[in-house]
Every structure is written in structure tokens, then in C-alpha cells.
């Protein structure tokens, strides 16, 4: 075919994603060539760990020196899948300065040091593509940057961490408490040996920073995202939520409120009938609301080498086929919006606490909420005497008013346990 063109890839890292990218490029080589005229070849792989160099991959492909990729004029695209925010930054920076387009799956890097990389890409006229950085195989970056450009997106809700969604799904199915399920997930290799980034919400926060930046065309860094994890969610909370018709999920919420940006991650009660409530196991989903579109949800595998590799390869092929690089080459953050104050955000809340089962307690609690303008939507008391447990759900209210009411409720001294609070979507 006359239009056939060889495109050589320098791959940084041969771990789970890197090796999957290599195998996918080889597996789909002929189909991509036939369909696009691009003859994709992995020319060199940077991998310093000999244990990560499998016997069925030609040893001559590997190097331990990044300069072998940087200084090879025949390498067109550098794919970074080593992770971390230091070497990965230096390699991408140097590759773009050396005239190469780059692809990365590194959400922590983009959410913390993305701005200077995007500025460099714009200055040097390079592509910096990152479909694999958020929600694995789900093509959410392409959809938000291109397909939704006229959609007027105002809200992005995401289930963007598979580990936590897996744990919460098992808790909902009553298969154990948080600690048991996390332990089993680690034994099965579904959860990392150090699960902090996943269960603590940091992984989801980095992904939501990226989605928020794209949605509102204004830079959101990891440090701009207030996040909580699921470590304090108990089986009891999940059971209560279920009784009340809710599913507990770790939700990322990026919203445009009065022209300002709010991006947060928190465990929340999601009504059973909401599309996000049906996202089970390690799957991810992104739910978009916009002026022109109403609601759209994309769901699918958010992790896994093979799955994530499809996003990397789609970026590579897209770069090779974009003759007029146009707007995709420049950073989409062309605005500098402010951030909406966290305590002014309106949320509905679930509260669970143990109370003294004596007359007047409910009235005193209700009056505290009333004093702060917090309206109660429903209330259940379970058990009696010392066992009495009170569950309240509020109407949406400013968070500062809600937390002021909680402080006053605690001061009443009729709560016999620390109140547990969760937001309600
Ligand atoms: N550890 C992540 C998750 C996948 O559990 O979803 C990679 O970001």
C-alpha cells in the first residue's frame, strides 16, 4: 500500500502495562497496518530489571540507558509506562525537546507536574497523549476532549478506582467486612500489597484532577482535590445503606458551581436506581452531565495490562494519523477558573450514631439541625436502650452548616458513639 508508513516506538518500562503494549502492537500489527497504513514497531524498550525481560522477547530490544531511545532519530513516539513522578517527568520532557511525540499512562505525574509538560508540548509542537491515565480501557479522555467539546459539561461523577469498587461490591454482597475483603483481594492479586493509594482515595483523586481539568478547561492539580478513602466504611454502614435503598461507592465528583471548580473524592451513598449504583467489581465508570447532553455514562475495565494497553495503542495510532494536529496538540486548560470553597458545596448526608433511648433525645437532635437550617429527609431508630442506633438522612445543605450541626449534636451529650457521616449522591 503506497500510504504505508513505519512508526517506531520507544517503550519506557516493561512491567504489566509495558509488556501488554508490546504484545498488543505485535498482535494487532497487520490489522492496524491494513486499516490505517501505519506499520507500528516497538524499536527499543527501556527496562533495567533483568527479571522483567522475558525470554520470548528479543534481548536486543532492551536497553538500560534512556539515551539509546532519546538519541535514536528513527524513534518517533516515546511511551512512558514506568510510573513515578521524577524519572518519568525527565524522560518525557527530554523526549519532547528531542522532537518526539509522547504517550503516558501516568496519572500521578500529570496530576502533579502536568502543567509544565503540557506547556512544553504546546511550545515544541508535540503530542502528549494520556488516554490510559484515567479509567483504563474506557476511552474517556477522547470522549471528553473531542466528542463532548460542545456538550457544556457541568458535572463529572466517576467510579475511577477498581480496587475500592471491588471491596465495596463484596461488602454490599455481605461477603465480609472491609479488612477481610481487602486481605482476600491482596491474596488474589486484585489489590496492591500496599493498598494506600487505592483505599485512601489518592489514585481516584489524581484521575479526577485530570478529568476536572479537561471538563472545565482549567488546571486542577492533585493538591486541589480534597479526598477521603473507604477505610472507615464499615459493613454496618453498607448494610444500613442497603436497607435504605442505597449502595456505598467511592465517588469522584468534579463540578462547575457558579463558574468555579470543585473536585473531590469521597465515599457516598448512591441511590440504587442511579446508573453508578450498578457498577460492580473492579469496573470503572464515568457519568457526565452537560447542558446539551443530559446524561451520558461510560463503563468498563479500569485497570489490567491488556485492557490499559488498548488505550495506549489508540493514542499511538491517533498521533500517527493526525496530520493537522490542531487543538489536540495544545493543552485544553485555556482558562484559569477559581475553586469553589469546599464548605459552601451543597450535599445531602447520611448520619449514624448511637443515642440514649430516653424521651426528648430526638427532639433535641432535630432542633440542633433546625437551628443550622439543615432539613432532615428521613430518620430511623433501630434497637432500644443502650443499643439504640439513630440514622438520619438530610436534604442537600451547605457543608459548613451540616458540620456545625454535627458539632452541636455531639455537644448535647446524648450520642453514645462518634457520629458516622457519609455524603449522599
Ligand atoms: N489501582 C488502580 C485501581 C488501577 O484499582 O483502579 C490503576 O490506576
Image (cartoon, rainbow, N blue to C red):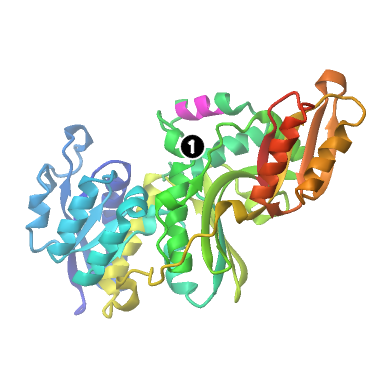
Quadrant of image for the N terminus: bottom left
Give 126 or 4, whichever is nearer the viewer.
Answer: 126
Give 137 or 206, whichever is nearer the viewer.
Answer: 206
- Quarter for ligand 1? top left
Q: Which residue is mark 1?
A: 200
Compared with 188, 301 (above or below) is below
Task: Give the residues drawn in magenta, as a range.
Answer: 181-186
Image side of residue 77 versus residue 422, left or right: left
Q: Position of residue 392 (x, y in %)?
A: 78, 40
Image side of residue 19 versus residue 346, left or right: left
Q: Residue at x 28, y 80 (%)?
A: 324
Q: Position of residue 388 (x, y in %)?
A: 83, 25
How many numbered dots are placed on residues in this image? 1
Q: Is residue 241 magenta?
A: no
Q: Position of residue 188 (x, y in %)?
A: 46, 29
Compared with 376, 190 (above or below) is above
Q: Position of residue 144 (x, y in %)?
A: 47, 67
Give 390 or 24, whichever is nearer the viewer.
Answer: 390
Q: Residue at x 68, y 43 (%)?
A: 404
* Element class at badge 1: loop
Extreme right residue here? 359
Q: Quadrant of residue 171?
A: top right
Q: Quadrant of residue 152?
A: bottom right
Query: Local crowd at mark 1 within 10 Å, few (<14), some, or many (≥20)?
Result: some
Amino acid at each position: 500500500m503506497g500510504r504505508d508508513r513505519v512508526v517506531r516506538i520507544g517503550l519506557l518500562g516493561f512491567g504489566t502495562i509495558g509488556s501488554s503494549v508490546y504484545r498488543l502492537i505485535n498482535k494487532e500489527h497487520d490489522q492496524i497496518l491494513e486499516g490505517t497504513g501505519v506499520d507500528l514497531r516497538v524499536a527499543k524498550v527501556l527496562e533495567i530489571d533483568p527479571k522483567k525481560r522475558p525470554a520470548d522477547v528479543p534481548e536486543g530490544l532492551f536497553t538500560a540507558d534512556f539515551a539509546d531511545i532519546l538519541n535514536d532519530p528513527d524513534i518517533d513516539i516515546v511511551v512512558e509506562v514506568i510510573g513515578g513522578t521524577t524519572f518519568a517527568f525527565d524522560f518525557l520532557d527530554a523526549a519532547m525537546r528531542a522532537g518526539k511525540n509522547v504517550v503516558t499512562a501516568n496519572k500521578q505525574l500529570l496530576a502533579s507536574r502536568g502543567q509544565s509538560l503540557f506547556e512544553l508540548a504546546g511550545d515544541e509542537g508535540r503530542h502528549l497523549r494520556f488516554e490510559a491515565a484515567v479509567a483504563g480501557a474506557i476511552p474517556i479522555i477522547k470522549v471528553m476532549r473531542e466528542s463532548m467539546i460542545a456538550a457544556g459539561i457541568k458535572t463529572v461523577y466517576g467510579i475511577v478506582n477498581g480496587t475500592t469498587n471491588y471491596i465495596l461490591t463484596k461488602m454490599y454482597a455481605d461477603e465480609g467486612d472491609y479488612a477481610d475483603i481487602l486481605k482476600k483481594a491482596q491474596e488474589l492479586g486484585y489489590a496492591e500489597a500496599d493498598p494506600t493509594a487505592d483505599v485512601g482515595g489518592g489514585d481516584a483523586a489524581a484521575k479526577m484532577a485530570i478529568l476536572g481539568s479537561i471538563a472545565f478547561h482549567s488546571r486542577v492539580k492533585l493538591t486541589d482535590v480534597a479526598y477521603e478513602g473507604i477505610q472507615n466504611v464499615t459493613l454496618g454502614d453498607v448494610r444500613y445503606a442497603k436497607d435504605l435503598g442505597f449502595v456505598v461507592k467511592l465517588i469522584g465528583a468534579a463540578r462547575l458551581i457558579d463558574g468555579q471548580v470543585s473536585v473531590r473524592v469521597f465515599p457516598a451513598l448512591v441511590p440504587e436506581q442511579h446508573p453508578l449504583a450498578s457498577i460492580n467489581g473492579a469496573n470503572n465508570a464515568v457519568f457526565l452531565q452537560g447542558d446539551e447532553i443530559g446524561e451520558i455514562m461510560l463503563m468498563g475495565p479500569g485497570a489490567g495490562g491488556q485492557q490499559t494497553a488498548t488505550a495506549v495503542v489508540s493514542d499511538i495510532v491517533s498521533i500517527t494519523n493526525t496530520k493537522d494536529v490542531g487543538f489536540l496538540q495544545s493543552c485544553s486548560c485555556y482558562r484559569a477558573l477559581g475553586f469553589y470553597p469546599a464548605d459552601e458545596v451543597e450535599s445531602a448526608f447520611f448520619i449514624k450514631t448511637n443515642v440514649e433511648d430516653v424521651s426528648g433525645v430526638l427532639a433535641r437532635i432535630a432542633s440542633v439541625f433546625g437551628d443550622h437550617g439543615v432539613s432532615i429527609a428521613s430518620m430511623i431508630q433501630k434497637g432500644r436502650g443502650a443499643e439504640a442506633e439513630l440514622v438520619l438522612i438530610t436534604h442537600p445543605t451547605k457543608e459548613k452548616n451540616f458540620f456545625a450541626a454535627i458539632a452541636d449534636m455531639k455537644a448535647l451529650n446524648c450520642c453514645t458513639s462518634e457520629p458516622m457521616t457519609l455524603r449522599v449522591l
